[in-house]
Image: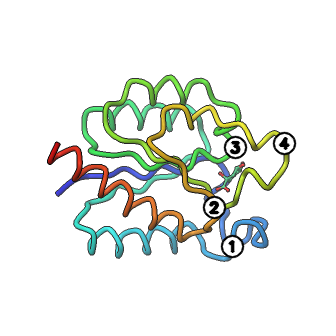
Amino acid sequence: MPNVIILNGPNLNLLGTREPEIYGRDTLSDIEEKCRFHAEKTGLSIDFRQSNNEGDLVTWIQEAASRSDGIIINPAAYTHTSVAILDALKQVDCPIIEIHLSNIFSREEFRHHSFVSPVAKGVICGFGAQGYLLALDAISSVISDKEEG
Ligand code: DQA
């Protein structure tokens, strides 16, 4: 079964109470549970993680490079600042999907730029928690295409 790592960046541990009008009322645990249920139906095994530290995310990306068949990442604020995360992702062969709960392009100007997008297969944003499930569907089809191809 393909293994997908789902990485979540800073402040996403506060989902549920953090600006719910922007990020919704689901907690990160609710999202993880939805992902587990969906991944099982889709035939993927998942490893779901969150950290407030840039270095943890870099280390997990480096580990995923040899262990995972796909990476789904919501880098949160590091999206807009982190060359370290970009550099780590550049060393990865498997498909990468970038996700955001909110539509970053309808928000402040500084959120319009992502360091991660240039190395992502695709970007999903603006669909709230549902975006994680869309990303699982997308990565599942990208992985199957790669296996067949
Ligand atoms: C976010 C969008 C980022 O701009 C923000 O810093 C976050 C969350 C999202 O999921 O919408 O923390 O990645």
Residue position marked by numbered label 2 in the rendering: 101
Q: Is residue 7 above or below residue 128?
A: above
Can you tell me whether the CB of the residue at mark 1 lies under 8 Å from the nearest atom of ligand 1? no
Residue position marked by numbered label 3 in the rendering: 77
User: Tag 4: residue type?
Assistant: Glu
Q: Which mark is first along the chain, 4 or 3?
A: 3
Mark 3 is surrounded, within 10 Å at the Cα level, by few (under 14), some (14 to 19) or many (20 or more) other residues, namely some
Can you tell me whether the CB of the residue at mark 4 lies under 8 Å from the nearest atom of ligand 1? no
Residue position marked by numbered label 4 in the rendering: 109
Q: Quadrant of the C terminus?
A: top left
Can you tell me whether the CB of the residue at mark 2 lies under 8 Å from the nearest atom of ligand 1? yes
Q: CA distance from mark 2 to mark 4?
A: 17 Å
Q: CA distance from mark 3 to mark 4?
A: 13 Å
Residue at 81% across, 53% down: 107
Q: Are marks 1 and 3 in contact (CB under 8 Å)?
A: no
User: Tag 1: residue type?
Assistant: Gly
